[in-house]
Amino acid sequence: MAIKKFAVATYLDEEVLFPAVKKVRRSGYKLHDVYTPFAVHGLDVAIGHKETDLHIAGFIYGLCGTSTAVGFISWIYTSDWPQNYGGKPHFALPAWIPITFELTVLFAAVGMVLTFCYLNQIMPGVKKHVFHPRQSDDTFVVALELNGKNSEEEAIAFLKSTGATETSIQIAESSWWYGRWDKKEAYETMTHI
Amino acid sequence: MHIKYESFIREPLVEGNKDYHQVSEDIVAPIEGKPGRMWYVGFFFSIILLCFGIFSVSWSVYWGLGTWGVNRTIGWGWDITNFVWWIGIGHAGTLISAILLLFRQGWRTGVNRAAEAMTIFAVMCAGQFPIWHMGRVWDGFFVLPYPNTRGPLWPNFDSPLLWDVFAISTYFTVSLLFWYSGLIPDFALIRDRAKTKLRKMLYGVASFGWTGTAKNWQRQEALALVLAGLSTPLVLSVHTIVSFDFATSVIPGWHTTIFPPYFVAGAVFSGFAMVNTLLVLTRKILHLEEYITIGHLEAMNKIIVLTGSIVGVAYLTELFIAWYSQSWGEMAAFQWRILGPYWWSYWAMMTCNVVSPQLFWVKKLRRNVPFTFVMSIVVNIGMWFERFVIIVTSTYRDWIPGSWSYYSPQWTEVGFYLGTFGLFFTCYFLFAKYFPVIAISEIKFVLKTSGRNFKEKMNHIEEMSAESFYHIAEASHHDDHDDTHGDDTHGTHDTHHKEEKTLVDSIMHPFNDEHLIEGATVVEHLLSPIVETKTETIEEVSHEVKQEEVITVAPIVTPVEEIPVVEAKEGTTETNFVVETDDTKVEEIKESTDEVVVKETTVDGGAEDRDLPSNSPIVDNTLPTTDTEKKGDDIAD
């Protein structure tokens, strides 16, 4: 929870956005984030994000599912309550493949989605600042975080030079909080920090 | 960003003149507007059916399953028939959303959302049948392995019926997660557009607070890809396990190893038919013909004719094996199936599933909307009969002639079946009203390659012959770099292709200020059909650098020394050269090697430009392909 000042630029075309992001990174301004209405490939690389490890997490969850299924069923059938089903051996591994597979998939999928929500900090009830009402529609938004030393005018002039269609200075919450989307937030009326 | 240019040979996925905003407007319109009269009528009838279903089920539970037509010989009737039918229908949604994602089929973007919704609702309907078939449904939780006071006595993990419990609940959960993770960004769009407070609040909750940062999207795509990878074997496993319910028994007609592939093909077959039924109506009622095009319907009809033929082959194989095995039980079962008192169900199945879908070999019929609609219903009737044939006609003539029997459904069973239609369509109508029925962000993603208006921009280049394109490119190339090459044999072509040359010029000189913005894109667009490998390699890299020069001399070997030195614009420190030196090898000459740095340093903004003079290209053959690039490609196509 920190209220900060941002210089915000919007772009209407990803062709303009990419060089702009490049310039921002070279300029020395602190890039808060880039918001796009859809997945723009290569943008993560352009910003300098490393590849996500979500799939590795998924693999680990999957292994948990596999071991849960095999461990649980073999414990039940060899030690807790061994039963003879149609003359099958107690340790009937081939017959457990379907359930083992299903649990692997289930654990991996559920685990990954929860991790995805955690990493992205999204959850029902979570609210975040939206820099531009059309950032989920057709507008690409670049937000620079301004500190005390940055001049607002210079930042705006810089953003304009990158081909921005609109620019603005906004005071906003930089992180997430619990809130209702139909309610105005206190910081929205602030004129300075 | 994938800005590979796609030829018109591939039909546009989005018709009309669209930009990103128009896509949002068109797809969100049904959510923001009042539903039409058709919606109210349909919804009303669905609710009626649902209520009748609830009444029938309540009646069955109150009086017991004796109210059903099943008996000791025919233990499974309409209930399990309907169960397998609904589960099969669900499979098309996962096939579209997962398998076609892995196969990089662009057309799935138009239909995947509705198809996945159909999957979820169909699985909900399917699940009802085994649950209520338990009779003492209040003991239903006995199927779950939990520590209990009966021993603890565990369920039979070696039984296909228990596998079903796991398979279907997993399938439902994973489909739901997959579907919802794709819906989140679209809910965010509706939330940001919302004019009313209530809508803003509700979609705010539904969108989980999504804002669409670059990192969010990166993770979202990684998630979608892995979930697709998980769902693909999952969907195959689910119907395989359903077929094990039959195949692991020793009943003639059921005890066959062909069942898993045969069931899966049948599931896809009926599922696509159901998708067609729904989408033909949806595109009409919600005015989405420009997004769910005839091309989409045709693609699905092609899958129907393929899977229908597979199913046909499976039917014939069953007959052949019954004869070839010389097992009298097997032979008798099929004889009774074809010629016994239930002959009509067998021949209904054969006609609807094997014979009539063959009409889809005719292109005109595949692209005919009313015919597609009628056919989709016919296929679903056929597939219902297939399950009926397998279940009832394998059991009604059993080992002892004294216990031979006949089965007709009672009103409770019919009511139950109609009730699941009510459940399905109630859910679907609510979905069509409150959810974006097309994945908006995915459509935007493919818009610039597959939208009609974007494809049309490339028309004049399409119409050029390869020869003339090559000459123009060459001419323009030599014209400019005469000193470098000292070869202007193609210079005379300039006069013949004045107009094209202007365009090619603009393409070949992205360093010109006027063409700065469009240049880089068009180069990729223009050259990608010629040099496939090139675009693959630089697709990600190119976005970082607006000012890139791509020189491609497709069939000619250009030694690296001949690369023209292009003067970098003021303030430009990076230039990408991509030179195809032979058929297979693409060399990237980069001054900036950001990817390498990004790969090594994980700090935000850690990639610093290397201190290199702007006119000394470094040949870097060892530039690693980052994981991001791979991932990007997977989703891109």
Image (cartoon, coloured by chain):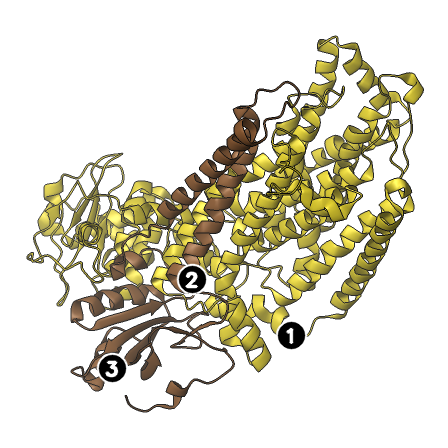
Q: Is residue B503 visible?
A: no
Horizontal and vertical percent position of residue B323: 75, 11
Closer to the camera in the image, B191 or B255: B255
Q: Amino acid at mark 3?
A: Ile
Q: Which chain appears yellow? A: B
Q: Amino acid at mark 2?
A: Phe
- Compare marks 2 and 3 and give the one earlier in the sequence: 2
Instruction: Please report contact status of discs 2 and 3: CB closer than 8 Å, yes or no.
Output: no
Residue shown at 65% from the left, 31% from the top: B160
Q: Which residue is mark 1?
A: B33
Q: Which residue is mark 2?
A: A38
Q: Residue furthest right?
A: B402
Do pointers 2 and 1 mark residues of a single chain? no
What shade does chain A have?
Answer: brown
Q: Quadrant of residue A76?
A: top right
Q: Amino acid at mark 1?
A: Gly
